[in-house]
Image (cartoon, rainbow, N blue to C red):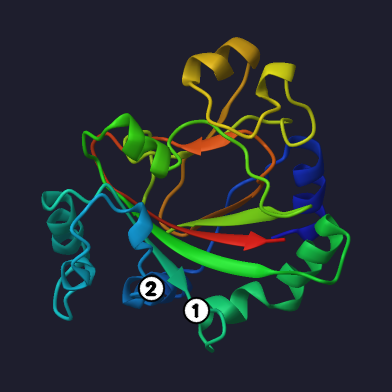
């Protein structure tokens, strides 16, 4: 990764290019993510039986995802503990990544948190799409912040790719200045271009969370993704 280029791209477009993780490292991150049991139960329209949400010790990923789908889990969110020594913590606190954060946020006082998402292809209600951040919106978590997304599965148009409206981290139409949800029609009527992040397992990219974005609803396949906030 070229830190200078990423900072320039974030400033100009609100998003970076897509980069690739090492083969062994991306497998380590996936294993770490699947081991986390810090589930966000507030975002699950379900009976909240923790044992049903855990991946079985000898359960392969495909069987685990299918089981979640069969019990109606459209999205499962877990928090990654960054206070523990692990591969993710080492990666996001490496000098290169911290330097990126310092340069883009213009401060050395940085907050970092990480979550892991499993998104399934299911027919869901409008309310559940709202909870799953599958409508266009923009965030205001910090005064300044950006996100690092890591795909932990292959993601194409069927998996629900991340979608971003370039330039809206700095300039939004008047009708989109409220921090709320917007329909696809609202966005396509106001902006000529959207960026869909298509990438293989291990793809990494950065976006400014003030830009208008969403995760598309998976239509045929699931999506596994890490979301790391720097604020």
**Residue 41 spot, x, y in % from top left:** 33, 61
**Residue 92 spot, x, y in % from top left:** 63, 72
Q: Is residue 32 left or right of residue 16?
A: left
Note whether 188 is above or below 128 in the view shown: above
**Residue sitting at x 38%, y 63%:** 40
Q: Nearer the viewer, residue 45 or 111?
A: 45
Q: Is residue 10 visible?
A: yes
Q: Residue 81 carries which label?
A: 1
Mark closest to the chain's N terminus, 2 or 1: 2
**Residue 231 spot, x, y in % from top left:** 72, 61
Q: In this view, does 206 lie to the left or right of 59?
A: right
Q: Is mark 2 on a helix, strand or loop?
A: loop
Label 2 vs label 1: CA separation? Answer: 8 Å
Quadrant occupied by the N terminus: bottom right
Q: Nearer the viewer, residue 124 or 193?
A: 124
Note whether 83 is above or below 207 in the view shown: below
Quarter of the figure with residue 49:
bottom left
Q: Do the residues labelled 2 and 1 touch (CB within 8 Å)?
A: yes
**Residue sitting at x 33%, y 41%:** 159
Q: Can residue 163 be seen in this view?
A: no
Q: Mark 2 points at which residue?
A: 38
Q: In this view, does 93 lie to the left or right of 134?
A: right
Quarter of the figure with residue 148:
bottom right
Note whether 185 is above or below 44 in the view shown: above
Quarter of the figure with residue 111:
bottom right
**Residue sitting at x 82%, y 71%:** 109
């Amino acid at each position: 990764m070229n830190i200078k280029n990423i900072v320039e791209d974030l400033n100009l477009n609100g998003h970076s290019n897509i980069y690739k993780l090492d083969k062994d490292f991306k497998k380590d991150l996936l294993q770490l993510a699947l081991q986390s049991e810090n589930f966000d139960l507030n975002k699950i329209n379900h009976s909240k039986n923790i044992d049903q949400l855990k991946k079985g010790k000898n359960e392969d990923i495909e069987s685990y995802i299918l089981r979640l789908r069969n019990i109606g889990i459209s999205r499962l969110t877990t928090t990654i503990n960054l206070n523990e020594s692990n591969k993710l913590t080492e990666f996001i606190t490496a000098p290169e990544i911290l330097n990126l954060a310092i340069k883009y946020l213009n401060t050395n006082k940085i907050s970092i948190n990480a979550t892991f998402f499993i998104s399934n292809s299911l027919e869901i209600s409008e309310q559940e799409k709202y909870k799953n951040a599958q409508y266009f919106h923009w965030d205001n978590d910090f005064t300044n912040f950006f996100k690092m997304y890591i795909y932990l599965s292959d993601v194409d148009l069927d998996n629900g790719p991340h979608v971003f409206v370039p330039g809206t981290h700095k300039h939004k139409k008047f009708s989109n200045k409220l921090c709320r949800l917007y329909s696809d029609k609202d966005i396509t009527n106001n902006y000529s271009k959207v960026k869909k992040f298509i990438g293989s397992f291990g793809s990494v990219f950065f976006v400014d969370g003030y830009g208008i974005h969403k995760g598309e609803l998976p239509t045929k396949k699931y999506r596994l993704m890490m979301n790391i906030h720097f604020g």
